[in-house]
Image: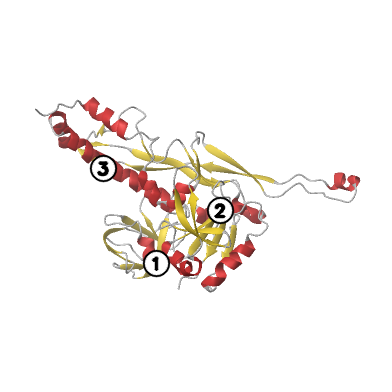
C-alpha cells in the first residue's frame, strides 16, 4: 500500500534535509569562498570595519620633543552594507498532490534536487563575486556586435549557461546599460563564444557583460584591491585616495616572464604588517607557473570547514587554482582578514515562517525561497595584493 504523506510531513522532511548548519559539499568547488573566515552576525543596517592606516607618530631623541610631536594614528572605518541575492525554484502543484497519496520518496528526492540546484547556483554566484567588482561584470566583448559574441577569455564563461539573460554596458560599473538583453541559447566554453536570441542595441567591442539581475552585487577583491588606483568616490563611506593602505597593493606583471612574476610579488610584500597567506589564480593562469614550482606543494586549510586544498608554492606563498577566479589576475589574500560578513548562514533556505514550500497564489505551483544576505570586507585592505598576470 502506498504511504500517505501529509503536507506538514513534506515540510518537516525537507526541513531536516535543509538544516543550514550542515556543510554543503558544493562549497568545495569554490575554493576561496570555502577558505575565508566568516562572520555570521551582520544583523544591523551597517557593519563597521575600523581600519588603522598609520601608527601614532612622534618618535624623538628627547621626551619633551616626543611629547610635543605626538599625534594619534589616523583611524578610518568602512561601513559595510548588505547585498541580498535570491533564488525561487518551483515545484509543480500536481507533483505535491501526488506525493500526498503515493510516491513520497520520489517526491522528496525530486524536490531535493531542485532545491540543491538552487542552492548550488547561489553558491556559484557568491564564489564568482568574491573575486569581482560589485558591478557583476563577468567579461568583455572581444569580437562580435551581434550574436555570436566572443568574450575576452573562454574561462570567463565558466558559470554561464544556456538560459542566462545577458546585459551589456560600455562602462565597467554597468552604468548606462545598452538597451535590450540577450538570452543565451548556446555556450562554447572552448572558443569563448555566446550565442543569444534577442538584441542588445549598439553592442560594441569592449563592452562589459553581466547577467541581468546581478549588476549590483557584493564587493569582491576587484573592488577592495582594484588593479588601478581608486578614485575619490567614497567606498563604503571612505575616500581611499588619502592613503595607499586603504585599497590593497597592486603589481603589474603583465609584461613579465612567468619566472619573474613571483620574485617581483615577493619583493612588493616585504615589510607588510599583514601579508597574504595564499594567492588565488584561474587554473589556466596557474598552469603557467606549475612546471617551475611543481616540486613544491602543500595543503592550505579552510578557516571555516574541515578540509583544505592543494597548492603550489613560490617564495613560501601558496598558489591555489580556483575556477571562480577571473583570468589574468592573481589575488593575494590574508585568509583571516578578508571575510564574508553574513546574516546567518549563506546561502540558506528562507523559511522563517516554518514553511520551505509556499503555494504560489496565481499558479498551480509551489516554490521554495533561498537567499544570501552578505557582504565581503576586510579590516586590513593593505594586506590584499592584486597581480595583473601575463596571459600568453
Asked whether 114 or 239 is in front, the reply is 114
In-front residue for pair 23/356: 23
List the residue tagged with mark 2: 277
275 to 147, vertically: above or below: above
Q: Is residue 143 visible?
A: yes
Percent of width and height locating residue 260: 57, 71
Seen from the viewer's position, the closer of residues 45 and 12 is: 12
Asked if marks 1 and 3 touch (Cβ < 8 Å), the reply is no
Q: Earlier in the sequence, mark 3 or mark 2?
A: 3
C-alpha span from label 1 to label 3: 31 Å
CB within 8 Å, label 3 to label 2:
no
Q: Position of residue 223 (x, y in %)?
A: 52, 54
- The residue that label 1 is drawn on is 153
Name which residue lies at 82% across and 49% down: 58
Asked if residue 184 is positioned above or below residue 347 in the image, the reply reads below
19 lies above or below 375: above
Query: Neighbour class for label 2 at 10 Å: few (<14), some, many (≥20)?
Result: some
Q: Quick one: SS at disc 1?
A: loop
Callout 2: SS: loop
> What is the CA distance from the residue labelled 2 to the residue labelled 1?
27 Å
Q: Residue at x 73, y 46 (%)?
A: 73
Q: Secondary structure at mark 3?
A: helix
Which quadrant would the N terminus be assigned to in this image? top left
Quadrant of res 146: bottom left
Checking the image for residue 386, the label placed there is none
**Which residue in the structure is indicated by mark 3?**
114
Question: Of the residues tagged 3 and 2, which is closer to the observer?
Answer: 2
Residue drawn 11% across the image and 29% down it: 2
Amino acid at each position: 500500500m502506498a504511504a500517505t504523506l501529509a503536507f506538514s510531513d513534506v515540510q518537516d522532511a525537507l526541513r531536516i534535509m535543509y538544516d543550514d548548519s550542515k556543510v554543503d559539499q558544493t562549497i568545495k568547488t569554490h575554493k576561496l569562498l570555502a577558505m575565508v573566515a566568516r562572520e555570521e552576525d551582520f544583523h544591523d543596517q551597517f557593519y563597521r570595519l575600523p581600519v588603522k592606516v598609520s601608527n601614532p607618530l612622534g618618535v624623538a631623541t628627547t621626551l619633551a620633543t616626543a611629547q610635543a610631536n605626538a599625534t594619534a594614528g589616523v583611524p578610518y572605518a568602512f561601513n559595510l552594507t548588505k547585498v541580498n541575492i535570491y533564488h525561487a525554484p518551483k515545484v509543480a502543484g500536481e507533483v505535491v498532490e501526488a506525493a500526498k497519496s503515493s510516491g513520497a520518496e520520489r517526491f522528496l528526492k525530486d524536490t531535493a534536487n531542485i532545491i540543491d540546484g538552487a542552492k548550488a547556483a547561489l553558491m556559484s554566484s557568491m564564489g564568482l563575486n568574491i573575486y569581482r567588482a560589485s558591478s557583476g561584470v563577468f567579461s568583455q566583448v572581444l569580437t562580435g556586435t551581434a550574436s555570436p559574441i566572443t568574450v575576452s577569455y573562454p574561462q570567463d564563461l565558466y558559470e554561464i549557461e544556456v538560459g542566462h539573460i545577458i546585459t551589456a554596458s560600455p562602462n565597467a560599473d554597468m552604468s548606462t546599460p545598452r538597451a535590450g538583453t540577450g538570452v543565451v541559447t548556446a555556450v562554447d566554453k572552448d572558443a569563448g563564444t555566446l550565442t543569444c536570441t534577442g538584441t542588445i542595441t549598439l553592442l560594441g567591442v569592449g563592452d562589459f557583460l553581466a547577467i541581468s539581475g546581478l549588476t549590483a552585487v557584493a564587493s569582491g577583491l576587484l573592488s577592495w584591491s582594484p588593479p588601478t588606483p581608486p578614485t575619490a568616490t567614497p567606498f563604503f563611506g571612505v575616500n581611499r585616495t588619502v592613503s595607499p593602505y586603504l585599497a590593497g597593493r597592486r603589481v603589474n606583471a603583465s609584461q613579465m616572464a612567468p619566472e619573474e612574476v613571483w620574485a617581483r610579488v615577493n619583493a612588493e610584500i616585504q615589510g607588510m604588517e599583514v601579508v597574504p597567506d595564499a594567492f588565488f589564480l584561474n587554473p589556466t593562469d596557474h598552469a603557467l607557473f606549475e612546471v617551475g614550482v611543481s616540486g613544491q606543494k602543500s595543503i592550505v586549510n579552510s578557516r571555516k570547514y574541515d578540509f583544505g586544498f592543494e597548492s603550489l608554492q613560490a617564495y613560501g606563498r601558496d598558489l591555489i587554482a580556483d575556477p571562480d577566479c577571473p583570468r589574468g589576475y592573481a589575488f593575494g589574500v590574508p585568509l583571516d582578514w578578508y571575510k564574508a560578513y553574513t546574516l546567518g548562514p549563506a546561502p540558506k533556505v528562507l523559511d522563517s515562517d516554518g514553511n520551505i514550500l509556499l503555494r504560489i497564489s496565481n499558479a498551480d505551483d509551489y516554490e521554495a525561497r533561498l537567499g544570501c544576505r552578505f557582504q565581503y570586507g576586510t579590516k586590513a585592505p593593505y594586506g590584499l595584493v592584486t597581480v595583473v598576470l601575463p596571459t600568453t
